[in-house]
Amino acid sequence: MTEPLEERLDRLSRRLRAAGGRVTSERLAILRVLAADESHPSADTIYRRVAAELPSISLATVYKTLTTLQRMGEVLELTAVQGECRYDGMRPEPHPHLICTRCGSIANLALEDVEVLLRLAALPAGQWTLTTRVDFWGYCPQCCAEVSGDTRPE
Amino acid sequence: MTEPLEERLDRLSRRLRAAGGRVTSERLAILRVLAADESHPSADTIYRRVAAELPSISLATVYKTLTTLQRMGEVLELTAVQGECRYDGMRPEPHPHLICTRCGSIANLALEDVEVLLRLAALPAGQWTLTTRVDFWGYCPQCCAEVSGDTRPE
DNA sequence: CTATATGCAAATCGTTTGCACCTTA
DNA sequence: TAAGGTGCAAACGATTTGCATATAG
């Protein structure tokens, strides 16, 4: 189910060149991090991870690359959590998330048929739908355990 | 279906006082604007509308009041569009939106049973779900008409 | 060689905060 | 008159941008 990393990097390289773009070590390193990170990292987290092996990279490049990858459909930008965007480079197709309002963690949910939503929504004819965002906000299991008792979260 | 304005303002006043808060002309004016605006306005738009009748109000007060109203469940904060938050003061219960990626407009959708989603999602037991966010991103009817042709939106 | 990317630093911009003053209850 | 709210201006923090330099093809 998971696409091999090398295959994905190759595909990115091909698509970049086909569009008149360049294949740079920065771009490859960023996708490598994204393709291996299940935690839906922020731009800054991606930056720090990439910097570990490519110390000269800048945060600006990370942002620019994320924009490029999003346009190409290789990465999904998620709903902002507390002011910052999070990215999903493992499952570029829209899928639901559970966002913890206490610790900020984001988990994928197992709702496979998001398409049902599209049908239920009955979008006006002739209208394009680019992305679906289905997010549930609540407490993650760990935060639930930590607060215990019956105090409702704020 | 729509609650009369005066009734809503009264309820807000009662709830504010019950919680040890004060009923101020600023708060009433802000809710008045929110309860009448179907366009999912931004904080700045709300500020400018309220300022028309209460010139001395500040943007900071609008932000502080929006936070208060959100906590009380009188207003819903929507997914950020191009960096800014949008608010829905007419239908505080979660409901799906169609967000236009071209002009930034936000329309309500007619999917009544968001609860179905919660059941489909099969959230882990013992987990609180505070809010559901179901958004569809695409072109609104007007933007569709303006671009015409079969060029896919970016 | 030339179009494209990168890195740096400065600029943006929505939102938050500290604090003195004003208002509600 | 005391707790709570407002207004102002400064602070914040994520993201964007301009531009000189570096690099892929």
Image (cartoon, coloured by chain):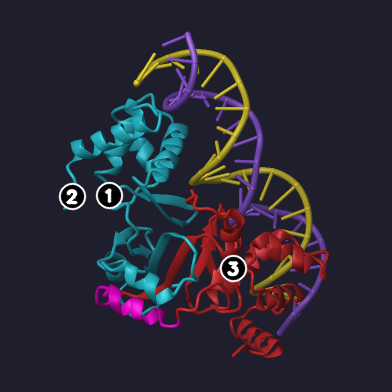
Chain colours: A red, B cyan, C yellow, D purple
Q: Position of residue B140 (x, y in %)?
A: 31, 66
Could you say which disc has been placed on residue A87 in the image?
Answer: 3
Residue B101 showing in the rendered view: no
Chain ID for label 1? B
Q: CA distance from mark 3 to mark 2?
A: 38 Å
User: Where is the C terminus of chain B found, in terms of image quarters?
Assistant: bottom left
Foreground disc of the pair 3, 2: 2
**In the rendered structure, which segment of residues is drawn in magenta?**
A112-126
Q: Position of residue B31 (x, y in %)?
A: 31, 38
Q: Residue A12's image quarter? A: bottom right
Q: Is residue B149 left or right of residue B131?
A: left
Front position in the image: B130 or A9: B130
Front position in the image: B51 or A2: A2
Q: Is residue A107 left or right of residue A51?
A: left
**Given the image, on which type of amino acid does mark 1 rest?**
Met
Q: Position of residue B64 (x, y in %)?
A: 46, 36
Could you say which disc has been placed on residue B2 in the image?
Answer: 2
Labels 2 and 1 within one chain: yes
Q: Is residue A65 left or right of residue B49?
A: right
Front position in the image: B44 or B149: B44
**Given the image, on which type of amino acid does mark 2 rest?**
Thr
